Image: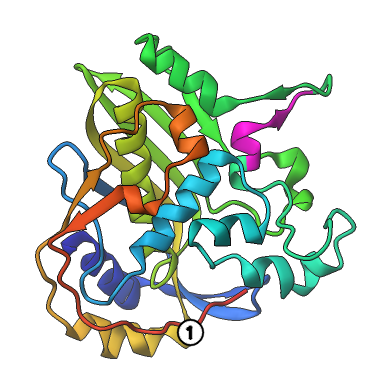
Amino acid sequence: MRQYIDLCQKIIQEGHWIRNNRTKTNCLTLINVDMEYDVENNRFPLITTRKIPYKSAISEMIGHIRGYSNVQQFKNLGCDVWEANANKDQKWLRNPNRKGKDDLGRIYGVQGRSWKRPDGSKLDQLKKIVQHLKNRNDNRAEIVTFYNPGEIEMGCIIPCMHTHTFSIFRDKLYLTSYQRSCDVPLGLSFNQIQCFILLALISKITDINPGRVYHKIINAHIYENQLSLMRDVQLKRSPYPLAKLFINPEIKNLKDIETWVSSDDFKVVGYRTHEAINYPLNI
């Protein structure tokens, strides 16, 4: 919580106003932010100064792992954050690559699970990495990326948290996650959870003890219409101790995550929180 609070305060104190072309909204912006999450000691980075729908965040990550590309697929898992991007973004609605209502295009996990090669075949990046890690074959390139420069126009949004690098170091598994753009009041509360969940899950199914997540954010920002809620409400609240996360021990392999795992298989213990804050979403 302290690093999250420090980041919000730093953006307010040191950030510069930048107008975002996509949303046509001004953002108080900071460049180059580093966060860390301690998975080894189960210090679950769940924000306590406002209530976070953490099950939705977990469901979204499960959907990315499965390679989902449709609003209804995410909704069936319990995540309803993709409606606006799929069905209200005017630029995407006009995009000839859009396949109709609820289609998200080739976003996030679609690239991670079915990257198109020049010969037309598809590469399952995540499956390859899991197999490498299970065999303790870390070639310093255990990378899954959702960012495909050749298919940017084929998705409703450019992936924000776009690349994940796994590293085996001293018999522990580490994760470095790269994020090009971060809506700090809304997005980061999900992104922190998802980085933690991703390392915890991959560690579990590869049977390697987890270490830490290193989360690199390039552009961290607070939108102009979010600023007063952050400065005058959320930052006035005192944080509570971090919760702990427990994962269903029956989850054994990637196939389990692909087929039956849901947010109900993740139990959060000791989550004490202040009331929710309804930050506006800028699309």
Question: Of the residues shown, which amino acid type is indicated by label 1?
Answer: Glu
Q: Is residue 252 left or right of residue 151?
A: left
Residue in the foreground of this view, choosing between 80 and 163:
80
Where, by quadrant of the figure, is residue 45 drawn? bottom left
Instruction: Name the residue at 34% across, 45% down.
Output: 197
The answer to whether residue 115 is magenta is yes
Q: Magenta segment range? A: 110-117
The answer to whether residue 56 is magenta is no
Instruction: Name the residue at 44% across, 32% down.
Output: 256
Q: Position of residue 105 (x, y in %)?
A: 74, 52
Label 1: which residue? 224
Where, by quadrant of the figure, is residue 210 drawn? top left
Confirm whether residue 147 shows in the render. no
* Tag 1 secondary structure: helix
Q: Considering only vertical position in the picture, is 53 above or below 251?
A: below
Q: Considering only vertical position in the picture, is 211 above or below 184?
A: above
Q: Position of residue 209 (x, y in %)?
A: 21, 25
Q: Is residue 150 left or right of residue 58?
A: right
Q: How many marks?
A: 1
Q: Considering only vertical position in the picture, is 30 above or below 64?
A: below
Q: Position of residue 144 (x, y in %)?
A: 52, 31
